[in-house]
Amino acid sequence: MKLLTNIPAWITNKFFIATAVFAAIMLFLDKNDLFTRVDRDRQLRELVKSKQYLIGQIAAEQAVLDKMKTNPGTLEKYAREKYLMKRDNEDLYIIPENSPEPKN
C-alpha cells in the first residue's frame, strides 16, 4: 500500500487516465494508428513521385507522336529504328551492340 501513496495526484485523476487511455488507443490500436499513417504518407510520396515521372513520359511520347503525325520523315525513321523495317531494294544488317570479341 505504501507504493500507491507515492503516486502523484494528477496521475490518479480520472480525466488524465481517460485522456491517456484514449491517446493510447488512437496512437497504437486504431485502424488509422500512427504507424499506419506514417506508412501511408510514405506510399503517397512515392506515388506522387511516380505520377510526376509518368506525366513527363507521357509528354515526351506525345511530342514524338506529334512529330510523326506532321513529318513523314520522322515516321519513316521511327519505323526503321524501332521495327527494323526496310525498303524493297535495301538489305538490312543487324549488328548487336554488345557483340563478343572473336576468339583466336
Image (cartoon, grey):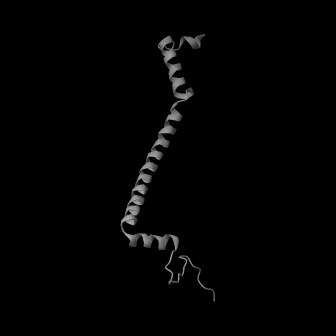
Q: Report which quarter residue 64 is drawn in.
A: bottom left
47 relative to 69 in the view: left or right: right
Q: In the displayed image of the protein, which residue is found farthest to the right?
A: 104
* 97 or 62, nearer to the observer: 62
Q: Is residue 59 visible in the rendered structure shown here? A: yes
Vertical position of residue 89 compared to residue 4: above or below: below
User: What residue is at 40 percent from the left and 58 percent from the top?
Assistant: 62
* 103 or 74, nearer to the observer: 74
Task: Say which quadrant the N terminus sits in.
Answer: top right
Vertical position of residue 89 compared to residue 98: above or below: below
Vertical position of residue 82 compared to residue 15: above or below: below
x, y percent for residue 103: 63, 86
Q: Is residue 13 visible in the rendered structure shown here? A: no
x, y percent for residue 83: 52, 70
Task: Say which quadrant the C terminus sits in.
Answer: bottom right
* 79 or 29, nearer to the observer: 79
Q: Report which quarter residue 30 is drawn in.
A: top right
56 relative to 39 in the view: left or right: left
Q: In the displayed image of the protein, which residue is found farthest to the left?
A: 70
x, y percent for residue 28: 55, 28
Q: In the displayed image of the protein, which residue is found farthest to the bottom?
A: 104
User: What residue is at 50 percent from the left and 38 percent from the top?
Assistant: 40
User: What residue is at 43 percent from the left and 53 percent from the top?
Assistant: 53
* 71 or 95, nearer to the observer: 71
